[in-house]
Amino acid sequence: MKNLHIITPVKDSIESTIQTIRALLSSSIGVPYTYTVYNDFSTPENTALLEIYSRELEFELVNLAEITDHPSPNYLLVLQMAQKRAVEDGADLLIVESDVVVNDYTVQSLVEGAEEREDCGIAAAVTVDEQGEINYPYNYAKGREGEAYAVDKHCSFCCSLLTNRLLNAYNFTKLDPDKHWFDVHISHISQDLGLNNYLFCNLPVTHRPHGSRPWKQLKYSHPIKYYLNKFFKRVDKI
């Protein structure tokens, strides 16, 4: 099997972030892997906490404030840096966002599931709430619990493995720098390249939607205010 690079982009929300990190680092992973947390302009206090945890738990911390002055979100830069590293190492790339908690078997099972499918571009774990019910962004998968199947709809990057074949076939420097998020576009690119994206509903991960960016909760509590922010402040561009 290939090497594996795991990344978590972070902006504040330290409590949920540490849960994400601890769950990953305590997982049963049977392939060589590296784990990098990309700190996207968290507050100085939270940056200091991340630095303490990086030494205690032994993960690599990249503070984007030391690399760029571009304001958060810097998801594009994270994807480009992570892709370059993974391609150079011949590795797959697993993205686990900071509002997701994996199970002990999640990572290894995603690796094996992608490896078994020669046409796999993206292998995604379905997200569930704390009661185990499929939730956003995979509401469309309700009724297919326990299955693993190719999807036409996009895979979110909540907990998704981008295979090395996809990383080698499309350079993320081609992505639109005016956008903020890229899971929809990369999902479509994967399919355009003749690859399939697989959703593993038999590998649920706990997800608190938008826990890392609380203002996006407005989408549910005050949708009009959310869309005013989205269009007039030009945020959350997909």
Image (cartoon, helix red, strand yellow):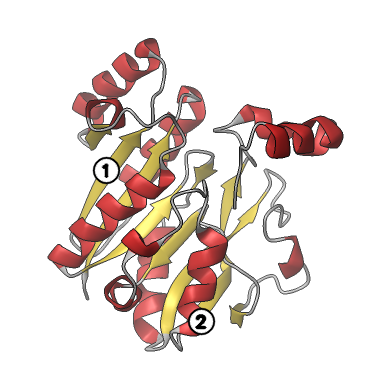
Dividing the picture into quarters, in which one does residue 155 lie? bottom right
Q: Is residue 27 visible?
A: no
Label 1 amino acid? Thr
21 or 37, nearer to the observer: 37
State the residue position of label 1: 36
CA distance separating discs 2 and 1: 27 Å
State the SS at label 2. helix
Q: Quadrant of the N terminus?
A: bottom left
Query: Does residue 68 appear left or right of residue 231 in this picture?
Result: left
Name which residue lies at 48% across and 56% down: 159
The numbered disc on residue 55 is: none
Left or right? Give the position of 88 relative to 48.
left
Residue indicated by mark 2: 191
Q: Position of residue 81 (x, y in %)?
A: 26, 50
Residue 19, by quadrant, is top left
Residue 5 point in image, percent of width and height: 26, 57
Which of the 4 image quarters holds residue 218? top right
The amino acid type of the residue labelled 2 equals Gln
> Toward the viewer: 196 or 115?
196
Badge 1: few (under 14), some or many (20 or more) residues near its Cα, within 10 Å? some
Foreground of the two, 229 or 112: 229
Give the residue drawn at x 24%, y 28%. 54
Q: Secondary structure at mark 1?
A: strand
Q: Is residue 51 above or below residue 93?
A: above
Q: Position of residue 25 (x, y in %)?
A: 31, 43
Label whose residue precedes the other's in the sequence (2 or 1): 1
| Image position, residue 221 (x, y; %) | 83, 32
Residue at image x 40%, y 54%?
95
Please state which of the two labelled residues, at mark 2 or mark 1, is closer to the viewer.
Answer: 2
